[in-house]
Image (tube, rainbow, N blue to C red):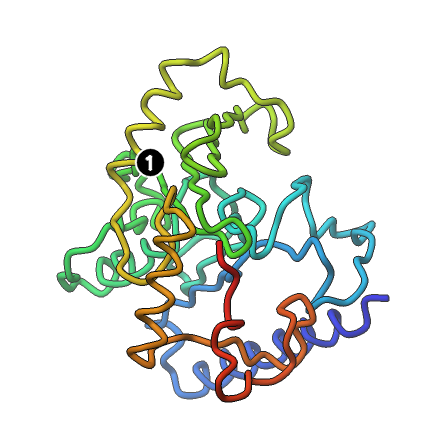
């Protein structure tokens, strides 16, 4: 049942191993930092639209989450495996420092001793180099615009995970230090936290000219689509095996109206 997935991981492991072996032969491994991360959470539908398979009984790949890949504003869609390797510099082990992929640029620049461009990222080099007292942290992390929930927003702040499907709907709140699977909504018990999350949903969002902004009407979205079509900027999915996309080939000329859902 997992042969294809196992083959993918086997090829990945072999490929990374060959790269590491080559760097060692070239005598550059000691001065190379390797960052490795997943690009999204697990696929709750099964790989590329194939039938949903049960979780692996040994490795528990899916974790406890009910929502994953492409519902990217749920924690199961954005929480990913991540490790960093630097021979003889970073000690093996685990830590619970909360980081996000846009921290990688700041971290790489910090390790290289260069000044990075201004971004929202925070270097986690102090954590990697066992200097936790020097580690700065994010007040919160923010996501929006899940593929199948384009109005959704979410925030991770300390032990809290907050999710709002639409600005017109109540925000759900979970204490993931006690409820990692996000099954018990405690929003009614923490109005102060909900107030802060509501502020973050506003202050962290930047309006997009093209993508769906949380709360936009069908009329507003249709106007954006019309503008994209007129400018020739409409995007189409051309993935060959994604049955859940509803297409297996690029849309024919004149069919651009079907390229994306209305909301």
> Going 68% across and 39% down the picture, which residue do you hit?
64
Q: Residues within 10 Å of mark 1 (few under 14, many from 20)?
A: many
Q: Between 142 and 221, which is closer to the camera in this rendering? A: 221
Q: Badge 1 is on which residue? A: 201
Picture coordinates of residue 151 (x, y %)? 44, 46
**Towards the viewer: 226 or 134:** 226
210 w.r.t. 185: above or below: below
Q: In the figure, 236 relative to 84: above or below? A: below
Q: Is 63 situated above or below 17?
A: above
Percent x, y of residue 70: 56, 56
- Total label count? 1
As rendered, which of 149 and 225 lies closer to the eye? Answer: 225
Residue that appears at 79% across and 58% down: 52
Measured as percent of width and height from the top left, residue 144 is found at 41, 47
Q: Determine the residue positioned at 37% across, 46% down.
A: 216
Most extreme residue toward the right is: 1
In which quadrant is the N terminus drawn?
bottom right
Figure check: 250 above or below 97: below
Q: Is residue 51 left or right of residue 18?
A: right
**Residue 83 position in % (x across, y down):** 49, 57
Element under disc 1: helix
């Amino acid at each position: 049942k997992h042969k294809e997935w196992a083959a993918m991981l086997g090829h990945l492991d072999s490929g990374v191993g060959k790269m590491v072996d080559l760097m060692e032969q070239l005598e550059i491994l000691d001065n190379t930092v390797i960052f490795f991360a997943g690009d999204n959470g697990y696929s709750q539908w099964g790989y590329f639209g194939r039938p949903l398979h049960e979780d692996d009984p040994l490795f528990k790949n899916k974790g406890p989450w009910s929502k994953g890949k492409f519902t990217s504003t749920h924690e199961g869609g954005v929480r990913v495996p991540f490790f960093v390797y630097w021979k003889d510099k970073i000690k093996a082990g685990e830590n619970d420092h909360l980081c996000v992929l846009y921290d990688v640029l700041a971290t790489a620049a910090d390790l290289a001793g260069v000044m990075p461009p201004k971004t929202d990222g925070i270097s986690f080099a102090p954590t990697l180099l066992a200097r936790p007292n020097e580690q700065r942290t994010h007040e919160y992390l923010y996501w929006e615009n899940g593929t199948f929930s384009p109005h959704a927003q979410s925030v991770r702040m300390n032990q809290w995970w907050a999710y709002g499907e639409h600005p017109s709907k109540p925000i759900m709140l979970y204490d993931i230090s006690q409820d990692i699977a996000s099954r018990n909504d405690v929003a009614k018990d923490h109005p102060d936290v909900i107030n802060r999350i509501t502020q973050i949903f506003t202050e962290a969002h930047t309006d997009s000219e093209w993508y769906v902004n949380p709360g936009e009407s069908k009329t507003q979205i249709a106007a954006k689509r019309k503008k994209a079509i007129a400018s020739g900027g409409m995007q189409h999915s051309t993935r060959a095996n994604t049955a859940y996309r509803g297409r297996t080939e690029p849309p024919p000329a004149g069919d651009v109206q079907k390229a994306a859902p209305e909301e």
